[in-house]
Amino acid sequence: MALVVSVGTAQALDGRESGLQAAHHALNHMGVNTPNLAIVIASHQYQAREVLNGVSSLLGEVPTIGFSSSAGLTQEGYCPHSVVVALLSGTFQADTVWYPGYAQSGRDTATKISQYAAARVERQSLLFFADGFNGDAEQFCSALTPGLKITGGLSSGDMHTGSTYQMAGNQSGSGGLVAAFMRGNIKIGVGSDHGWDPVGSQFRVTRSRGFWLRTLDGRPASETYAELFGYPAREWAFPPLNYLTRLYPLGVQQGDEMIVRSPIRVEADGSFRMNAPIRDGIDAYLLVGSYASCERAARQAAQNALLQLGNTKPAFALVLADISWQMLLKSNPGIEIAAIQEILGTDIPIAGGYTLGQITPIEGATPKFLNQHIVVIVFGEQTEE
């Protein structure tokens, strides 16, 4: 049986009604096919339990995972204050698992996932979503079994309160990680890229502790940005500047490559709250994004994902874009979807949302934690060898 995917979306006053309507729309397009997996992307403005109740009232025991996002994405484009439900049906199986302890220890959660995967001999792919404000995603990635094909993102939500949620089966909450273990006749291709480039400003990281980047060139990080952008340093600790720093990430050297590391917010003391540690003594470069470079990056990510599918025809694309994309493209929302459709075509169902970090697999190595990227995950049907 070929992989069949349908996507439904809905907006309503409460999460239960939105979840129910989105699931209903998705089911209507499934025909006689029975879904094997449901992926739910819900506005952080809804209550997780309400969304899950609405979805499960129609889907019953269908394995389900989901996450909160500042907005949803579908083949129609940008979907604010909504619930998006993608249903996948085919000759594959999916197990969904809830790991509530991710925020306390990414390493322990990675060990549990690796053990769960090792207990199954079949070829499998993993999709996961974790808390974007709490937990150490780099620690999580480094503790996973090398070569494990795992892809996912860090859920976003209210930037002011720092709250997100995750959903799996009939469980939901904050601070956790949800995973779907997929095996059978399903093949996944993953592509990623970002649209931010260095603009010439270079700094030395002179003090960093854990997730807090405290000083650049010996001064509070907010003072460095105040000098660059012309706003007083004290204003960077308050909305909207305290979270708009996400638009201006840092490029830092890691081995032979430059990686992107993005602030989540500016703290009252002028330090940047990151979601990945940055070492003292390294050089950092200011990065700035643009419409044109983001459109190019979206097309490149889709192209790379298709290349990984090989001769397999794509049936569905899951798009995980960094929340900075939403901020940058605010005056023209959804252009990243249009760019992806230039590569995939307009007939491929799409679902997605905005994240605070992205994770992509690396052949024979542990997965890579990214900031500021767009990740395109294409699903196709493949007969088992």
Image (spheres, rainbow, N blue to C red):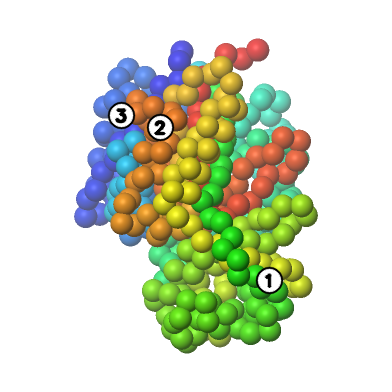
Quadrant of the rendered structure where residue 282 is?
bottom right
Q: Quadrant of the C terminus?
A: top right
The local crowd at label 1, few if under 14, some if 14 to 19, many if 20 or more residues have their Cα within 10 Å, is some
Could you say where residue 194 lies in the image, as x and y percent from the top left? 54, 49
Q: Which mark is residue 317?
A: none
Q: Secondary structure at mark 1?
A: loop
Q: Amino acid at mark 3?
A: Leu
Residue position for label 3: 27
- Residue 57 in the figure: left or right of residue 129: left
Q: Nearer the viewer, mark 3 or mark 1?
A: 1
Of the image marks 2 and 3, the number of the one nearer the N terminus: 3
Q: Which mark is residue 210?
A: 1
Of the image marks 3 and 1, the number of the one nearer the N terminus: 3
Of the image marks 2 and 1, the number of the one nearer the N terminus: 1
Residue position for label 2: 342
Q: Amino acid at mark 2?
A: Glu
Name the residue located 27 percent from the left edge and 34 percent from the top edge: 24
Quadrant of the rendered structure where residue 342 is?
top left
Name the residue located 41 percent from the left edge and 22 percent from the top edge: 4
Q: Secondary structure at mark 2?
A: helix
Front residue of this view, candidates 217 and 210: 217
